[in-house]
Amino acid sequence: MNSMLVTLVLLLLLGFAYQTGWSRSSRLAQVEGRLHSKPIYHGALVAIWAIVPALLILGLWALFGTATANTRFRTLTSAVVLASAFGTGAIGLYLARNRISARFRARNEVERIIRYLLIGCSVVAILTTLGIVLSLLGEALRFFTFVSPVDFFFGTVWNPRFSSVGTGSGDFGLLPLLWGTVMIATIAILVALPIGLMTAVYLTQYAKPKTRNIIKPMIEVLAGIPTIVYGFFALVTVGPALAGLGAMFGLDIRATSALTAGIVMGVMIIPFISSLSDDVIRQVPRALRDGSLGLGATESETIRRVILPAALPGIVGAVLLAVSRAIGETMIVVLAAGNSPYLRLNPGEPVSTVTVTIVNQLTGDTDFSSPQSLVAFALGLTLFAMTLVLNIAALFIVRRYREQYE
Amino acid sequence: MMNALREDLTQMNMVVRQLAVDTDLYTLPSTTIRTPDLEPQPVKIKARNVNVFYGEKQAIHDVSIDIPEKAVTAFIGPSGCGKSTFLRCFNRMNDTIEGSRVDGLIELDGRSIIDRSLDVVELRARVGMVFQKPNPFPKSIYENIAYGPRIHGLVRSKADLDEIVERSLRKAGLFDEVKDRLHDTATGLSGGQQQRLCIARAIAVSPEVILMDEPCSALDPIATARVEELIDELRENYTIIIVTHSMQQAARVSQRTAMFHLGNLVEEGPTEKIFTSPEVKRTQDYITGRFG
């Protein structure tokens, strides 16, 4: 109720300030002839001067004020803060209003403020990334006071025990988890690369525009399916089907296994590979294609020997992006990989991955001073570093490729 | 204004039609064509009443022409007059454009090439093409030349292939410039070298006809002179058709010239005659630079 009232007053202040600037400059225009800036800019500038200081004070109060406020004086302090906020607003309004003159460059000033606003918005994203890295780093360092980095990065046994048992030594070996992640991502790429690439070749080289306009959006729907739904699909349909199929050939494939998760994840990243490859294949100049066809090469010879080699760097970039996506994927693996953190070669056996383990370590009762919880941050940092390197490599390759044909 | 223009166009079309009848274009002697500085040459390609459509739009209207063997024929005319489109009929490159349609009669050595059942792979091995912009594949110089012979299965051994590559580069006058870097990437060559590489690439398949679509438009004058020289040498062994914007180029390299305008063949004949005493005023206007 209170905050609604404050918002209402702020809006009133905004409207009033705009109106003041606008009407004053309009009146001035009637007396002095043409102004440098149109009245709307004068109005906007006065409104900004009135509202920004008030918002700043209220914002600071919301961030830091409540912690310091004594409960007994809460009403009093908040009244003082509100009064000072609106007071500053009024002073800002008054000052800005008095600056209005025929020569005053309100338009330029408004444009400059808008630029700061836009810069501020883009900084938010960068600061967030930085904040995530720092918080991961801090907690990960705390974890490494319990377990040595060598034991973590090169340990082959993952058995953290429960934190309730005490801080007694569990085994925090990363390798079994990393192995699971790599195995599932590899299976996913083995599924997605041929299918995605051939889809892209069909769409760019063979499909008529009409067919293409139908097929392309349908493939992209795949990218819009929530990963938890893929997880259900893997658990309920693909897993049992694979187990049945394996049994037919005398193979022992578990319903929840690296294979199940990998195949379903492969399906999930098909649209990534197909639409990114589609783009890079499209960028291969038509002249190359004509040159090959003009020499009497068939359509498929042209694709295999000219177009795909020319598009290769871009395709590699697309694959790397897809891999980093597969490495970070969580929901499918939580449901379908079996959560069994052992080093096993057989893809038909259950495995566990880095992402799944993070989920496990942070759900339920967590005590953020035990290595059992803190390890999640070390795992997160490892994952972040892996995907970061892959993304940078992919962007680098794709950019090099673009330059080649521009 | 628009009406006047339209009337002009209609009149012009009538003139062109009349001209076609007058000069007996449809009953041209189809066995031999007289070229000024050569013995009469047999006809390599015969085209009769060819129409080309892109969707609803007609790009070529009822064109008939004979192309002599082992001579250079130039197609000239203002931009968008259909000369490139017509050129691309001879190796069926128009097939690669969505919605294009060709009708009429085109024969290569007396065999129809318009027929849908014809194998374009075989046709394009006999009728090579060089494009407006040099378009070497992003592979090595050697691989660029070897591409055609490989896909057509012309070679059995590495030695055969080496020999074809060297011979083709020599014919294109490029061998001495690149012999030490055959395995470097072809995109590192200069524009003129790239275009000669593309000619060598076409020659490597041993075609009978080479189509050139404004082969010098992306080259500087020196590289252009080099390519023109090459065209003149190639005439001995190949039938060449060259589309060009440059009147001087047509005059320099060709023995016969065909003038196109708005999808019609305005006039064709020995190059000397076209450039000195054209029969149609429009040709003269174009050649002297009064339009186009």
Image (cartoon, rainbow, N blue to C red):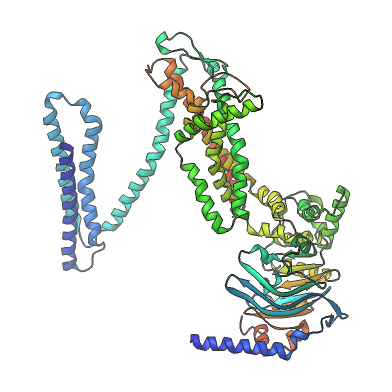
Splitting the image into 4 quarters, where does residue A299 fall? bottom right
Residue visible at 18% across and 45% down in the picture: A10
Q: Nearer the viewer, residue A207 or B43?
A: A207
Splitting the image into 4 quarters, where does residue B105 fall? bottom right
Residue visible at 22% across and 48% down in the picture: A49
Q: Position of residue A50 (x, y in %)?
A: 19, 47
Residue visible at 49% across and 33% down in the picture: A233
Splitting the image into 4 quarters, where does residue A71 fall? top left
Q: Position of residue A117 (x, y in %)?
A: 33, 47
What is the number of callouts on the image?
Answer: 0
Q: Position of residue A370 (x, y in %)?
A: 41, 15
Residue B96 relative to residue B30: left or right: left
Q: Position of residue A113 (x, y in %)?
A: 30, 50
Q: Nearer the viewer, residue A132 or B117?
A: B117
Residue A190 visible at all? yes
Quadrant of the frame with the C terminus of chain A: bottom right
Residue A406 vertical placement versus B243 (above, below): above
Quadrant of the frame with the N terminus of chain A: top left
Residue A156 vertical placement versus A388 (above, below): above
Residue A381 visible at all? no
Residue B88 relative to residue A47: left or right: right
Residue visible at 62% across and 72% down in the picture: B53
Residue A122 vertical placement versus B121 (above, below): above
Q: Nearer the viewer, residue B196 or B162?
A: B162
